[in-house]
């Protein structure tokens, strides 16, 4: 357990730090891009991580609720809940002008962005901060990067794991000492840009009524929600090839070949959000090729082998995405 040393005051607070935070947790019907939010919670914090207020809502996903055994929200419970467009304005007011903070923030942001895209709107979020990334920046001695481990490190007691309101409370209480530790040590916060979705399908995805899709399920089609395919250029220089004894580094060029269990566009979205470059072909500059069939005689695999480009499968790559090193400089 770490005891907070609160010597960092407003007078010594880093001027470059954000002026406010919105600690967010969402529970969902699954992990695929057509999955929906079933509950959401926001704790608003001031510049130094002090709680200002909190908000919680259930959301009717208009479909099967997915892994009830995880979030505990059944179809009967959600039947009378508001639809997302009915809570979108209040949710946005809680986020407006603040940095979105979440544990695995890329996931929470993507789910929120897709819900706003379906509502033909956009969340007023410009930056996000992942508490997993912050824990790594601080080199916290955690056995793993689960929320329960972060909470235990700071002596925060979980009461209802996978309940959006309690998870957001736990994260808010653990984020404050993390923020103060970063300020005292002059650590630059790992802030990332949030890009709203700018394109969505005209027809909704088919509901999975009566089916417990579960986390990790894949159900994509014409109704999938997706960002614009025009991606901004990777802002980081290419640091070279991936090495198995080191993590991925921002700026690396990653190519994909063959079928993937996760929707290819979603996998590419995660790659870009991690600060990597999605390469459409393999060259001597390619850092890594991701394929589930390295023996297939595709042009990418053939070129990768001829160039000596490292090759990993999708499962290994997904793990690597959890720990991408920042770019040099």
Image: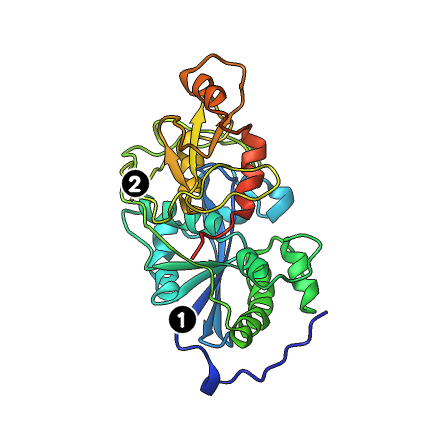
Q: Which residue is mark 1?
A: 18
Instruction: Give the percent coordinates (x, y) of residue 128.
Output: 42, 58
**Camera-side residue of 195 and 11:** 11
- Quarter of the picture holding the N terminus: bottom right
On residue 231, the disc is 2
Q: In screen coordinates, is 263 left or right of 161?
A: left
Task: Indicate whether 261 appears above or below 127.
Answer: above
Task: Indicate whether 95 appears above or below 209.
Answer: below
Q: Residues within 10 Å of mark 1 (few under 14, many from 20)?
A: some
> What residue appears at the point 71 percent right and 54 percent down from the top-left corner?
143
Residue 158 seen in render: no
Q: Residue 92 occupies which quadrant of the picture?
A: bottom left
- Report, in whole angstroms, how far the alpha carbon at label 2 lies from the one at label 1: 27 Å
> What residue appears at the point 34 percent right and 65 percent down from the top-left corner?
96
Q: Earlier in the sequence, mark 2 or mark 1?
A: 1
Q: Residue 87 occupies which quadrant of the picture?
A: bottom left
- Quarter of the picture holding the C terminus: bottom left
């Amino acid at each position: 357990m770490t005891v907070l040393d609160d010597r960092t005051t407003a007078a010594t607070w880093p001027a470059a730090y954000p002026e406010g935070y919105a600690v967010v947790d969402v529970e969902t019907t699954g992990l695929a891009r057509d999955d929906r939010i079933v509950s959401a919670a926001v704790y608003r914090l001031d510049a130094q991580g002090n709680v200002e207020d909190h908000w919680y809502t259930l959301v009717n996903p208009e479909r099967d609720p997915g892994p009830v055994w995880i979030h505990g929200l059944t179809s009967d419970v959600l039947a009378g809940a508001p639809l997302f467009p009915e809570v979108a304005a209040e949710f946005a007011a809680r986020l407006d002008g603040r940095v979105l903070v979440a544990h695995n923030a890329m996931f929470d942001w993507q789910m929120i962005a897709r819900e706003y895209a379906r509502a033909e709107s956009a969340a007023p979020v410009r930056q996000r901060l992942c508490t997993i990334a912050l824990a790594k920046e601080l080199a916290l001695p955690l056995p793993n990067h689960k929320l329960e481990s972060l909470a235990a490190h700071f002596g925060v007691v979980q009461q209802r794991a996978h309940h959006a309101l309690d998870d957001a409370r736990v994260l808010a209480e653990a984020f404050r000492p993390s923020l103060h530790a970063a300020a005292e040590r002059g650590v630059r916060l790992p802030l990332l840009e949030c890009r709203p979705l700018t394109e969505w399908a005209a027809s909704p995805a088919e509901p999975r009524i009566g089916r417990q899709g579960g986390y990790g399920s894949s159900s994509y089609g014409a109704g999938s929600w997706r960002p614009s395919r025009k991606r901004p250029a990777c802002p980081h220089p290419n640091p070279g090839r991936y090495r198995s004894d080191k993590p991925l580094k921002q700026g690396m060029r990653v190519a994909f070949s063959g079928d993937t269990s996760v929707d290819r566009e979603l996998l590419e979205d995660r790659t870009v959000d991690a600060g990597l470059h999605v390469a459409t072909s393999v060259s001597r500059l390619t850092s890594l090729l991701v394929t589930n069939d390295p023996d297939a005689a595709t042009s990418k695999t053939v070129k990768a082998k001829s160039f000596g480009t490292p090759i990993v499968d999708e499962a290994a790559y997904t793990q690597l995405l959890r720990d991408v090193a920042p770019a040099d400089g």
